[in-house]
Image (cartoon, rainbow, N blue to C red):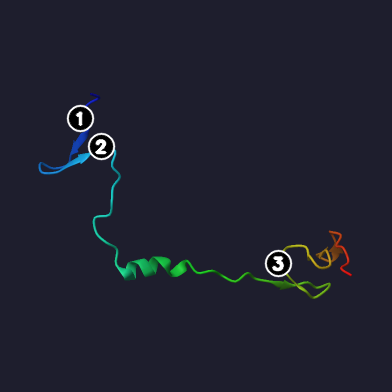
Amino acid sequence: MAGNPWVVLTTDKLIPKGTMPNPKRRHSKARRDRRRAHDFLVPQSLAECPHCHEAKLPHQACPYCGYYRGREVILVKESV
């Protein structure tokens, strides 16, 4: 044997070594809901492209015209 497999917490409780701690009390619904108050999804912000006036992500090249900050930075294929 490699030693005693039990840990003595008090005189009346023996807990096996290697067990993980578990919650002693149940969390209330209010506490659970307060924790989840910030878990909502935020809609993505969009900016208007000054060149073609399409909606695009801010600080990104426009996927419709390829312009960023007044100059063409990517080539966009024409859709026919």
Upstream in sequence: badge 3 or badge 1: 1
The kind of residue on which mark 2 rests is Lys
Q: CA distance from mark 1 to mark 2?
A: 9 Å
Would you say the residues marked 2 and 3 are in contact, meaning their CB atoms lie under 8 Å apart? no
Residue drawn at the location 83% of the way across and 64% of the way down:
66
Q: Quadrant of the C terminus?
A: bottom right
Report which residue position mark 2 lands on: 17
Q: Residue at x 78, y 63 (%)?
A: 61
Residue lying furthest front in this view? 80
* Element class at badge 3: loop
Q: Residue at x 60, y 71 (%)?
A: 43
Relative to 6, does residue 63 appear above or below in the rendering? below
The residue singled out by tag 1 in the image is 4
Residue 78 in picture, x, y percent from top left: 88, 66
Q: Which mark is residue 42?
A: none
Looking at this view, name the residue that lies furthest to the top. 1
Indicate the amino acid at tag 1.
Asn
Horizontally, residue 52 falls left or right of residue 47, namely: right
| Residue 7: x %, y % from top left | 20, 37
**Rendered location of residue 8, percent (x, y):** 16, 38
Question: For mark 1, does the 10 Å Cα neighbourhood hold few (<14), some (14 to 19), or many (20 or more) residues?
Answer: few
The reply to whether the C-beta atoms of the residues labelled 3 and 1 are less than 8 Å apart is: no
Image quadrant holding the N terminus, namely top left
- Please, what secondary structure does the residue beneath circle 1 have? loop
